[in-house]
Amino acid sequence: MLGGIFSFHSSWKDRQNTYMHKPLPLQCTSLNFRGFQFAQAMLFAIEEINNNTDLLPGISLGYKIYDACGSIARGVRVALALANGNGDTSVLSEAPCTRPAQVQAIMGETSSSPCMAIATVIGPFYIPLISHFATCACLSDKVKYPSFLRTIPSDYYQSRALAQLVKHFGWTWVGAIRTNDDYGNNGMATFTETAQQLGICLEYSVSFFRTDPPDKIQRIINIIKASTSKVIVAFLSHMDMDVLIHELSYHNLTGYQWVGTEGWIFDSQTAAMDRHHILDGAIGLSIPKAQVSGMKEFMLDVKPLNTSSNEMFTEFWETLFSCEFKQTKSSTDNQRECTGNEDLTGVHNSFTDMSLMPIFNNVYKGVYAVAHALHSVLGCNKTCDDKVQLDPLKILQHIRKIQFKTKEGYEVYFNENGDPAAKYEIINWQPTENGLVDFVTVGLHDASLPADKQLNLENKSLIWAKNSYQVPLSVCSEKCPLGTRKVLQKGKPVCCYDCIRCAEGEFSNSTDSITCVRCHPEFWSNEIRDACVRKDAEFLSYEEIMGALLTAASLFGTCMTAAVAFIFFRYRKTPIVRANNSELSFLLLFSLTLCFLCSLTFIGQPSEWSCMLRHTAFGITFVLCISCVLGKTMVVLMAFRATLPGSNMMKWFGPVQQRLSVLAFTLIQVVICILWLTISPPFPFKNFKEFKDKIILECALGSAVGFWSVIGYIGLLAMLCFFFAFLARKLPDNFNEAKYITFSMLIFCAVWITFIPAYVSSPGKFSVAVEIFAILASSFGLLICIFIPKCYIILLKPEKNTKKNMMGKGAPKSF
């Protein structure tokens, strides 16, 4: 004996109990043809098994079917009736009872909440409860519901599949409506959890039940109207969806993209009710299509109704054929009278609609699962052992282990949670020209595959809300373009954000970037900030105007020095050249030439050799130069000191001593430079800190002590030279060179004193230019102050270039 619990009615009348007397029985309303269809599917399977000699030979299956009206309380009551049995057996009877009083298994119920209650009550008795349409993931808990099994996949998979579907189309800002029962609440909870993991936000999530008062449904309508999301995920049963459609049509709320569950997405009755095309373009998950040969004919083969039929079947007949029997017909009613012999020819309603064949197939598979388990328990081969005591726990254990294929080739088995394999078709509601809706399969979802391969959409054109062929956009904030990053809006979900442009030196090369990535030090962000481009390398080059001018000045100084040297060599025997140690003069001109040329090593891209050469060459040549000037100053000073009676100072500062002093002073600088180059030499360096968008190629000093030792030594010699020249400035002579040396040293010291702050404060290549300018300025100062007056005398005033004039014999003149 098999039990069946189906909802032949979809609702009931609420009664206010006064607790003064026993509550009246539940009054069921709203006849539900689906319940009759599910019952017919069960009867078809039982009849087919009873006519099958291979399955349960010699054993006939019977049934007891109850109406639960969709009520949890009623469902529990009829389940207990099935578990207890209503066939009384006399205790005094000696004949064995071959017909069990209780059922071996129960088929049903359709909804999750009644199933939870029923499974809780009958679970301790281990009576199998096999549902064809209860999908709540909570029913997979075998601790709470040990005897529950189902032939429809769990919402654990459907909720995740819905979230993947929503994510696939880029909808990150959606609304959610659910049935206020275990099916809707648990399914939506799983969907919400998965959606958050996928970056989807719910603008609102509301629930209702079909028996709720109108004002509660009106509040939901107001929420939808006020929302900004254009996609609504509806985790609803078909009965609740029918109620919602009625309200949506009344308020003409069209243009929303609906995403549905198997509860209503492939329900033709729901589509028929949608006369205002509220749900056009809807997309969702359904149970894969199925066919069971002979079932449609069996269902539509309605036997003539006899007068002994109960009240419910009378109601069914009257509703099916839109007629009334004589005993119920009122005098004012215009409906035709029922005869009981009507047939379904030309009748089109939800009972004749076979769109729910996949669910009918689930009922069919559930009955066969019990039959195969009984076949195993009874040890059936050609006959069955009818003396075996049927134990519900034993039957339940065998049902969990069964694995077979139906005559149509559908595989039936249950996993450890009592669930079948989770496979769904993706359905798209596509309106037709005649105003009807086609349920077009546009893809598949197989939960048994790896996560990235579960969703598989076919290459078919989908129709969306408002009959559009463009995928609707439903986001709280538009995608952040390249070169920006997301900043969350305060107090709003993570899908609501502002797009902030990346800072300088940062980039983002993907849309909706959370952070901007800092460019490599050698790169800088472009104008759009979506990529990094290589920074311009800046150094003082020969090609730019400033480099060209400094090069020209250096070469001009070199040529000018060469010209002076040529003049001095040409007039080397004249008194003015011979008067001031011509040997030191030529050495000074040579060192000045090197000073002018060494400035060229500062121009161009720094390299390892140029960095070491520029500072050391500059240091050594300038020391050589200053040493020569110092020698000339000492010659002047000693020469006049030697004219005093009894003085032999020139004996200690003759030509040899002068050469040795120049060599000694220069060698000290050479030693300093060698130590600098040995310990920590200058090296090419890329300066990223000076400018954000440029790389400054410069020479790092290596050892700052070494650099400032070189500069300091030059400064020391310059100050010493200036001191001696200052002492000799008033010595009597018509052409006292000490005056010009003093003036040249003033220029030299002024240039290098001002060089220090200018060098430190100048950015990038300008610091190099400042150093070159200082070298050239001081070199020109020495050249002009010491040699140009002599060249003036030699070339333009040859009459003064005499020994007599040099000795001050002529009229004294100041220069």
Image: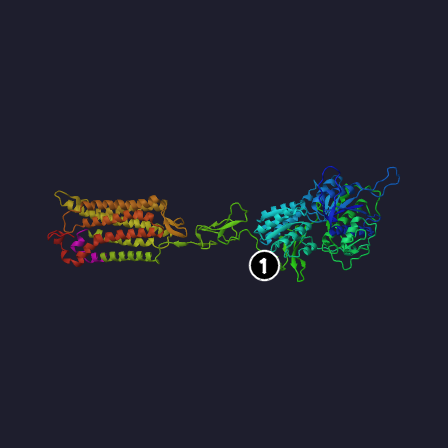
Q: Residue furthest bottom?
A: 433
Q: Residue at x 73, y 51 (%)?
A: 32
Q: Residue furthest right?
A: 94
Residue 605 at x, y percent in the picture: 37, 54
Query: Magenta segment, principal secondary structure?
Result: helix
- Whether residue 563 is in magenta: the answer is no
Q: Quadrant of the N terminus?
A: top right
Give the total of numbered labels. Answer: 1
**Pick the front one: 246 or 188:** 246
Report the span colored magenta. Answer: 565-580
- The answer to whether one can see residue 451 in this image is no
Q: Residue at x 32, y 56 (%)?
A: 546
**Pick the front one: 617 or 424:** 424
Residue 131 at x, y percent in the picture: 73, 47
* Colouring style: rainbow
- Whether residue 569 is in magenta: the answer is yes
Residue 680 at x, y percent in the picture: 37, 45
Image quadrant in which you'd find residue 534:
bottom left
Q: Secondary structure at mark 1?
A: loop
Residue 66 at x, y percent in the picture: 77, 46
- Kindly identify the amino acid type of the residue bearing the numbered disc 1: Gln
Q: Which residue is mark 1?
A: 470
